[in-house]
Amino acid sequence: MLTPGWRALAVALSAALSPLPALAAPQLDLVVRLEPTQGSLSAHALIALPAHEAIDLRIDARHRVTSMQLDGGALRASTEGGLQRIRIAAAKRPRQLELRWAIRADAPDAGATHRDTLTAFAPQIGEAGSFLAAGGAWYPLPFDSAGPLLHRYRLTVDLPAAQRALAPGDRQFDTVRDGRRTVRFDMAQDSEGADLMAGPWVEAERSVRSIDGRTLTLTTLFHPDIADQAEGYLDAAASHLARIEQTLGAYPYSRFSIASSPTPTGFGMAGLTYLGIEVLRLPFIRHTSLPHEILHNWWGNGVYLALAGGNWSEGLTTFMADYALREANQGEEGARAMRLDWLRGLSALSPAAQGSLASFGGRTHDASQSIGYHKAALVFLMLHDTLGASAFDRALRDFWQAHRHRRAGWPDLRAAFEHASGRDLGRHFALWVDGSGLAAPTIAGAVAGPDGLTVTLQQPAPHYPLEVPLHVRIAGQVRIERVALPGAQARVSLPPAAGCAELALDPDFRLARRLAPGEAPPVLREATLDDTLGLTVLPGDERLATAARTLTAQWLDRTPTIVDAAEAPGRASRMVIGNFADIDGWLARHRLPARDRDGEVVAWALRAPAGGTLALVAARDANALTKATRTLPHYGQQGWVTLAGGRAATRGQWPAATVWTKTCVR
């Protein structure tokens, strides 16, 4: 994913402050001295102001500006909306603005969760690692009336020799002298800003050849305890980068770095990714998160997001990286399972929680991920199915060439797809991007006669423009008909069927639609994403109840309603937590299927007779549940999971079965 939600912050700040006319972004020369053991940073900036150009700079009000001069004369900033704001009117001659400031910051919180990092803007400085996000305005950011301006910079970092530094841009030098290290990064393209990272890293490096003949440098900057992972990550990065270049064209930067973080981050910036140490230890990350972050150098960190109108890059990156790799490595069966998982999460969201893609700024919780990543990926999949691979790929290559190192939004994507396909996609984008919710097509009727089979499809308002995959099975043979359903209803006539025909609507889950009740076995996420979820913590010792509260605080996006244990499961979703004996007794009292798995902690999803989804968590004792609180929320896509020592031991999903509608010749 991209750096933590800074666009939402930037738009809010620019809206809260009085606007200035649009201005050209200056080039910044930044020099910083980082002292991790002291939790401090001192900085100096020289900003050349061209003639006839106004400037509006903003820096976090918590930072202590020690000097500010314009052409040698003292200058003062105003404080507005948590920012120090420096406004300088245009002049007839070039000028130079000079600032000095200091930052005090806490060390990274070793106990932080991934959710904590998603909205973290405050600088973190410590021996285990330092992270200063550009969106947190750790240095003076240039703005205009719409928000932060793309800009270029030169950043020189002075820090202890035992530490290394990283920022977007070409690394010009990295030298050590008298116990200090000096590193300089030049960002020669218009960029979203200088995110600064540092840590006690071990560096490994490899050179590869780009598709356009340039030499690219791949680098890992890992904490010593995971330095042995470097070669595997460099191998994977080289492979993924070459594959993406074949589809979209040459990589837009000269380096790609993978750096480890002491907190569970998962961020992508121009030319680099910043991933948590524990995340990097996971063997599958180099084949899942890594290609996702590499692709962000085209989408999000190569073509930047428009400041308004929604974040399209996460969905496109999910479709072209996560989904494409699943399809390539596991075939259609694996890809179908991923699509089903997306639809399970989306179908669990209430209508009130179904936000539009145009309003999605970035992931802040599981519900926003379902919309901005998974629904958006399905929208791109539907475009791919409708337009064909050739037009789809051509549109993206044209979009990349037209908008690289510039801002672009959903309307620009629409224009690219329309140009490549020759089709008007206005209604498609209006409903799928600007609107909210999911389609709900159904088979309204099927009449078989000697002259053929007539099938009627329908959908409630709003009427999404759909091409519905209708599977027709006759005498054991299946064929697929793509039925256009642009409005409330559509009929299609099929050849006569001898005897009986069976019909299934989108059984491969290629449409962004709400799953029908009972269409797929439940997974834990169906309950945890439901904003009407109730919670029952079964009576037991207070330590287990405390662990249960910690678990739900980390797992759920909201505070659930407490439901008495005596209340029978109904149509509403519910999470039930207790020890083995109490959970087994609760299931027996409400005549629900018994627990059929063992472990220190067992969690599973169950559909209640009245239709509600139950997320059940049974623990051996409070200690076992406490160890599982950080791990268990990562397994929401599973139907069941068992844990030992806080780690998953076994997990799985119950397979979905295709629902067939049968019709016979009368």
Image (cartoon, rainbow, N blue to C red):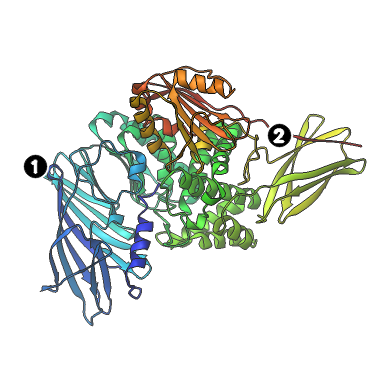
* Quadrant of residue 207 within the rendered picture: top left
Taking the image as shown, residue 103 lies to the left or right of residue 562, namely left
Q: Residue at x 73, y 52 (%)?
A: 484
Going by the numbered disc 1, the residue's amino acid type is Gly
Q: Secondary structure at mark 1?
A: loop
Going by the numbered disc 2, the residue's amino acid type is Val
* Quadrant of residue 203 within the rendered picture: top left
Residue where numbered disc 2 is placed: 659
Q: Residue at x 28, y 55 (%)?
A: 136
Image location of residue 651, percent across then percent down: 49, 24
Whether 56 is drawn above or below 290: the answer is: below
Residue 179 badge:
1
Q: CA distance from mark 2 to mark 1?
A: 69 Å
Q: Secondary structure at mark 2?
A: loop
Give yes or no for contact between labels 2 and 1 (Cβ–Cβ under 8 Å).
no
Taking the image as shown, residue 353 lies to the left or right of residue 280, namely right
Query: Crowding at label 1, few (<14), some or many (≥20) Cα neighbours within 10 Å?
Result: few
